Image (tube, rainbow, N blue to C red):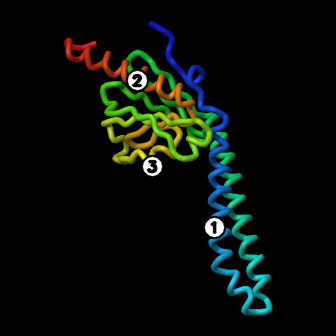
Amino acid sequence: MQNPVTEKDYPVESSWILKIPVSFSIVTVFICIFMGVILLPISFTTSEGGLVFLITIGIILVTMISIGLLSTVIAFLSRDNFHYSVENEFVIFHQGILSKQQKNLPYGVIQDVIVNQDIADRLFGLASLIIENASFGGGQVYGRKQAAALIGFVGNVAVIPGLTVENAEKLKGIFLSKMREFTNADDRGGL
């Protein structure tokens, strides 16, 4: 038996965690600009308008910064508690910060393996590997856009985010090769 491929071989890059505060910063700037455009004319019509304007923008900034920091901490903990192993007969996923979960995904139920890059991924030179399966675990079906925001597995998808584009393509090739091996073994009458 050959050594399994794991997150040590194709790691979730540390820069993946930076996607969250950068994304929240961009959203916060746009929300503040939008609210500024709406509230600025109102602030000049009353004597307390300037104060209302500053308080509103301050509340938005504090809220968005808090959400961004909390999301960054969760992403860091999620990355540190996410592990995968590409074995001979299936891929094993381990995840969970407070509640630990494991999923063994046989290659025979994998329907598609996709390398996905959203705008933030492109900024950081990253990609996500999305593995869609036919098992529909728990009855939940996730689309590719929903799945791209995940780390680990939920419903009918498993996602390995924060890979370099090169590593994502290599890992995709490994999965496709394993799927072909499994399909060929089934065609010959079993493993």
Where residue 40 appears, x then y in whole percent? 70, 81
Earlier residue among tags 1 and 2 = 1
Residue 164 sits above or below residue 153 on the image: above
Which label lies toward us, 1 or 2?
1
Amino acid carrying mark 3 in the image: Gln
Q: Residue at x 69, y 64 (%)?
A: 63
Where residue 89 appears, x then y in whole percent? 38, 18
Q: Residue at x 67, y 54 (%)?
A: 68
Where residue 131 appears, x then y in whole percent? 41, 34
Q: Residue at x 37, y 23 (%)?
A: 176
Q: Which mark is residue 31?
A: 1
Earlier residue among tags 2 and 3 = 3
Which label lies toward us, 1 or 3?
1
The C terminus, quarter of image: top left
- Disc 2, SS: helix
Crowd class of label 3 (few under 14; some 14 to 19; many from 20; radius 10 Å): few
Amino acid carrying mark 2 in the image: Phe
Question: Where on the picture, by quarter, is residue 157?
Answer: top left
Residue placed under numbered mark 2 in the picture: 175
Earlier residue among tags 1 and 3 = 1
Residue placed under numbered mark 3 in the picture: 146
Q: Residue at x 51, y 18 (%)?
A: 5
Name the outermost residue toward the bottom: 46
The total number of labels drawn is: 3
Crowd class of label 1 (few under 14; some 14 to 19; many from 20; radius 10 Å): some
Where residue 59 appears, x then y in whole percent? 73, 70
Q: CA distance from mark 1 to mark 3?
A: 23 Å
Q: CA distance from mark 2 to mark 3?
A: 21 Å
